[in-house]
Structure formats: C-alpha cells, structure tokens
Image (cartoon, helix red, strand yellow):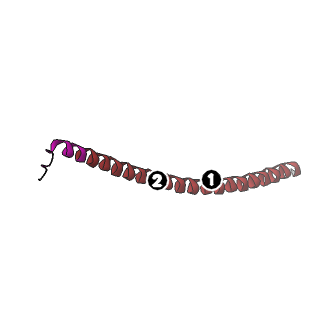
Amino acid sequence: MWKSIVDWATAFFGMTRELQEHRESIRELEKRVVELEGTIRLLAQEQRHSREIQGLEHEKLILKVQAEMTKKSLPAPKKKK
C-alpha cells in the first residue's frame, strides 16, 4: 500500500514538473510568435515601400522616354535672322 502511495506521489510530482516545463516552453513560444509577427509586419512594410519606389521609378522612366520622343518628333525651331 505504501509503495503504491509513493509511486502515485512520485508520478504526481513528475507530472507537475513536466507541466511547469511545458508552461515555460509555451511562454517562450508565445514570445517567439510575437517577435515573428513584428518581423513579418516590418517585412510587409518594407515590401510596400519597395513597390512604391519601383512604381515611381517606372513612372519617371516613362516620362523621360515620352519627353525624348516628343523632342524627336517636334520639328527643329526656325532660326531668326
């Protein structure tokens, strides 16, 4: 009888220790998830910013090409004497 009580108590304390370890692991995982969420937000913001810059550069290049085409299609100005 005493042996079964001791076995039960040993198992109980073992499970309590494991439970505490699992809780600590869960806290650490929750911290990592929060950090990952922040990193993902920063990456998304950086990607949006990069797309905006690329769009502006593209628009600037198109305007430059259009300006060059306009210069070439206009007749040369007449010289006044």
Q: Which mark identifies residue 21?
A: none
Amino acid bearing label 2: Glu
Question: From the viewer's perspective, is 67 left or right of 81?
Answer: right
Name the residue rendered at 67%, 56% in the picture: 23
Judging depth in this view, the residue of 27 and 13 nearest the camera is: 27
Q: Residue 79 versus residue 34: which sits nearer the camera?
A: 79
Residue 81 percent across, percent down from the top left: 11, 53
Q: Which residue is mark 2?
A: 46
**Mark-to-mark CA distance, 1 and 2:** 25 Å
Q: Secondary structure at mark 1?
A: helix
In depth, the one of 81 and 19 nearer the eye is 81
| Relative image position of residue 69 (x, y in whole percent) | 21, 43
Determine the residue positioned at 87% across, 48% down.
Answer: 3
Residue 36 % position (x, y): 56, 53
**Residue at image mark 1:** 29
Residue 14 lies left or right of residue 70; in this view the side is right
| Residue type beneath disc 1 | Leu
* Front residue (pair 50, 21): 50
Report the side of 4 relative to 80 (left or right). Answer: right
**Which residue of the protein is positioned furthest toward the right in this rendering?**
2
Residue 71: within the magenta? yes
Label 1 vs label 2, nearer the camera? 2
Furthest residue in direction front, as rendered: 81
Label 2: how many Cα within 10 Å (few below 14, some 14–19, many 20+): few
| Range shown magenta | 67-78
